[in-house]
Amino acid sequence: MLILLSPSKTMASDSPSVNFQPREPEFMKDAELLMSGLQKLDVSEIETLMKVSTAVAGEAHDRCSKWNVPFTTENSKPAAYGFKGAVYTGLDSRSWSAKEMDFAQKHIRILSGLYGVLGPKDLMQPYRLEMGLKWPNTAETKNLYAFWGDKLQQSLNKEANGLIVNLASNEYSKAALLKTMDNRVITPVFKDLIKGEYKALMAYAKEARGTMAKYIVQNRITNPEEMKGFDGMGYRWDASLSSDNTWLFTRDKNSIVA
């Protein structure tokens, strides 16, 4: 079983101690190829390409200029500690034991516009490259979906052992070509009761995805039926609203205003 997560735009700045042996990313050569293209762009070109502010483009350019190989524990950090945001608040990987980290390395994959896919122990350096970007625009690939699609699908199919739990966003899960996977794909969805109707509130749904991944890791879950016992953040599996492969977890929070 593999759990898919999205990365975050925000990178973590702290450097927690590492009590395991980090790994090199599976698609390191591809990451080097993409980064070599990014490093040729100036701030204004990044601003136009990524449709971001000058300040954000400047930060992205700075990350590109500092990105270098080979990756070491001095210039890189494991992906489990590399991202910051709602998903990673829920994931809470800094609290994992060594055995939990080992389990996570076998069962969690973080999809990435630059690295393709990262295990929690895989080393990474900060970057900004969203999967939905229409780049690199070459004769071979018009965008990152085309660049990564077949590679990601083959890698995930090989490791999934029959089941993928899709906790990634649509932008990133699209890159893995999940609709044509050889494995079963279960997508948990998190919704809150708002004025009599269940709605997905992204700020909560993102954290819930990370919280569910943490639940799977801490309970060593490999049978998907056990995921139905998840009650993190007050969400609970709703059989009446779920289908075979889309599992709805709902929460009655009448105080939340849409």
Image (cartoon, rainbow, N blue to C red):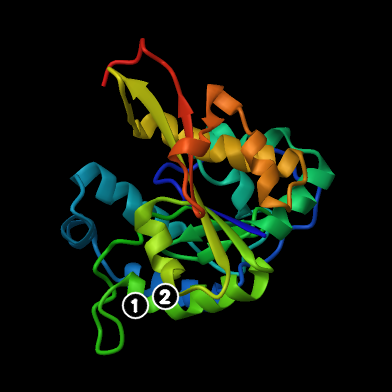
Q: Which residue is mark 2?
A: 149
Residue extending furthest toward the right:
99
Q: Residue at x 43, y 55 (%)?
A: 127
- Contact, mark 1 vs mark 2 (Cβ under 8 Å): yes
User: Dot 1, crowdedness within 10 Å: few (<14), some or many (≥20)?
Assistant: some
Q: How many marks?
A: 2
The image shows residue 212 at horizontal and vertical percentages of 59, 38
35 is higher (above) or lower (below) than 94: below
Q: Is residue 179 visible?
A: yes
At a point 50% along the width and 73% down the height, the residue shown is 181
Query: Quarter of the image holding residue 73?
Result: bottom right
**Image quadrant containing the N terminus:** bottom right
Image side of residue 33 versus residue 209, left or right: left
**Measured Cα–Cα span from mark 1 to mark 2:** 6 Å
Which residue bears the numbered disc 1? 146
Compare residues 233 and 78 and report the one nearer the observer. 233
Image: 164 above or below 158: above
Residue at the far bottom: name it: 139
The three-letter code of the residue at mark 2 reads Gly
